[in-house]
Image (cartoon, rainbow, N blue to C red):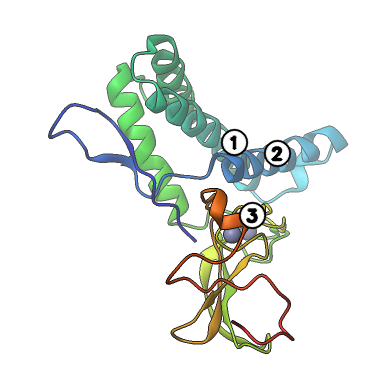
Amino acid sequence: MTLTIHATTDTRPGAAHPAYDPTPSIPLLITELTHEEFWARYAKARGDAEHFAPGYLAARETAALLLRAVIADLFALADPANTRAAADAAAAANRVRRKSLQMMLPANAARAWLRGEYEAWRNTESHPPNCPGHCRGTGIVMVTTTWQDDGAPVWAEPADCRRGEEDDPHADDCLCHGTGQRWNAESREYELCDRYTPGSDDARGEPRAGEAWSTGPYDEEPF
Ligand SMILES: [Zn+2]
Ligand SMILES: [Zn+2]
């Protein structure tokens, strides 16, 4: 489940290499951050942190620092002229480095390093083994992405684990009309609408020419 908007490190011509590809979902980053922070602090608050496996709590704390720095970096990338935001992002990145006893880096180098760390975090066992999303620590779960017209699941694909939380709702101005599924007239199947895509005003009314998105329940014949 990926987003395709690309933040760029530099808006000058020829400098369009995306800083994050795909761009992380900030709401999902905050969900990730709050979970990591909770698990790290909960053990300490109840006073038995010493009973946790070595590395478990340290990994939670490091991930929380990493995710807060990524959010700061994305915020800074959205407004390259905001030097305060850029400095905050660099400082947050260096906080992650200090946690792992690495030397501080100059601002741009720290932010570049952060992006690599985030990519590595995503591609490893990023969630705790007891993740409530049942990803068993992989950060990836299988999600049904295709259904028959009678609602029977057809196909599932790996997607980012949302820690057991539901995906955010799509309003009815989305191409899926808020159902979370889009009708593919060619394959005659419903497909997962994996990203809220607000349309123009006409998305609310009749399907546009060439499109056949369903608005109804499964027991209606697709138009
Ligand atoms: Zn998970
Ligand atoms: Zn949708």
- Identified by mark 3, the residue type is Pro
**What residue sits right under mark 1 in the picture?**
64
The number of numbered discs placed on residues in the rendered structure image is 3
What residue is shown at x 71% (from left), y 57% (from top)? 166
- Identified by mark 2, the residue type is Ala
- Tell me which corner region of the image, top left, top right, bottom left or bottom right, holds residue 61: top right
Which numbered disc, 1 or 3, marks the residue that appears first in the sequence? 1
- Identified by mark 1, the residue type is Ala
Mark 3 residue CB less than 8 A from any atom of ligand 1 = yes
Which numbered disc, 3 or 2, marks the residue that appears first in the sequence? 2
Residue found at the far right of this picture: 46
Q: Say the numbered circle drawn on residue 11.
A: none
Residue found at the far left of this picture: 14
154 lies above or below 51: below
**Seen in the image, is 27 located left or right of residue 210?**
right
Cα–Cα gap, marks 3 and 2: 11 Å
**Seen in the image, is 20 located left or right of residue 219?**
left
* Residue 213 position within the rendered picture, expressed as x and y whole percent measured from the top left: 56, 71
Q: Are marks 3 and 2 in contact (CB under 8 Å)?
A: no
**What residue sits right under mark 3 in the picture?**
128
**What residue sits right under mark 2 in the picture?**
40
**Element marked by disc 1:** helix
- Please tell me how crowded label 3 is: few (under 14), some (14-19), or many (20+) other residues with Cα within 10 Å: many
What residue is shown at x 71% (from left), y 84% (from top)? 220
Q: Are marks 1 and 2 in contact (CB under 8 Å)?
A: yes
Locate the C terminus and report the quarter of the image it occupies. bottom right
- Please tell me how crowded label 2 is: few (under 14), some (14-19), or many (20+) other residues with Cα within 10 Å: many
* Residue 196 seen by the camera: no
